[in-house]
Image (cartoon, rainbow, N blue to C red):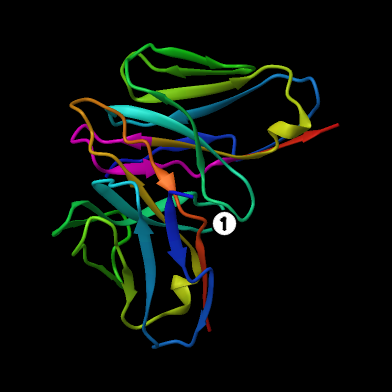
Amino acid sequence: NAGVTQTPKFQVLKTGQSMTLQCAQDMNHEYMSWYRQDPGMGLRLIHYSVGAGITDQGEVPNGYNVSRSTTEDFPLRLLSAAPSQTSVYFCASSQALPRGGANVLTFGAGSRLTVL
Amino acid sequence: TQLLEQSPQFLSIQEGENLTVYCNSSSVFSSLQWYRQEPGEGPVLLVTVVTGGEVKKLKRLTFQFGDARKDSSLHITAAQPGDTGLYLCAGTNTGGFKTIFGAGTRLFVKA
């Protein structure tokens, strides 16, 4: 089915290790974003991209890198994992907004990351 | 920094009761969305509101966007156990691409 695909679904890391969470969408959406979800804190925006080659920081960008080389893919990199990055990560995408329009997000199923 | 304050954080009610969830901010948003999330899944869109004062109805759910586009509410009439879940409000900035979420309201409807 068309949509947003995230891999892996589960990952355990040791402090200091690096890894990449993958996100791919097949809906030709211009906008993609990464959120983390922690208990009692809703979803917090990490990074987002409004098109290939363009990325910007969200609310909690520290410790994470992103790139957008194609419209379809938006990987999230943790260069040196810390226990504070233990969370569930969601990737989301949406179509380019018309002026004054709504950013309707389609979410992936999430990636649960544990950093020991 | 834009913030969305959602209340209450947790709500446990009996089947048949009515409830209202609030989403407030000091910032103006170009649009506001309500999502529902089930355990182990990503949020799924319920509704989008874009015009100040707009009211939308989705069966027993009524959504309202404040006149100043800074706040919104979700009202559920005659709640059912199937309404149990995490409800999230989300606002998009007036530039159009940055969407932030409230902390969510966890609703539990007892049969």
Relative to A76, is A84 on the left or the right?
right
Protein chain holding label 1: A
Q: Position of residue A9 (x, y in %)?
A: 53, 68
Residue sitting at x 62%, y 46%:
B38
Classify the position of the C terminus of chain B by image quarter: top right
Q: Quadrant of residue A103?
A: top left
Q: Quadrant of residue B79?
A: top right
Relative to B85, is A47 on the left or the right?
left
Q: Is residue A3 above or below residue B102?
A: below
Q: Position of residue B10 (x, y in %)?
A: 65, 40
Q: Which residue extends farthest right?
A: B111
Classify the position of the N terminus of chain B by image quarter: top left
Residue sitting at x 44%, y 59%:
A5
Q: Position of residue A80 (x, y in %)?
A: 34, 83
Comparing A101 with A83, the one in front is A101
Q: Is residue A12 above or below residue B43?
A: below
In magenta stretch: residue A35? no
Residue sitting at x 52%, y 59%:
A38
Which residues are the magenta region? B91-105
User: Which residue is under mark 1?
Assistant: A39
Q: How many dots with numbers? A: 1
Amino acid type at mark 1: Pro
Comparing B92 with A8, the one in front is A8
Q: Main secondary structure of the magenta part?
A: loop
Crowd around label 1: few <14 · some 14–19 · many ≥20 (10 Å) = few
Relative to B83, is B96 on the left or the right?
left
Q: Position of residue B71 (x, y in %)?
A: 40, 24
In magenta stretch: residue B96? yes
Secondary structure under badge 1? loop
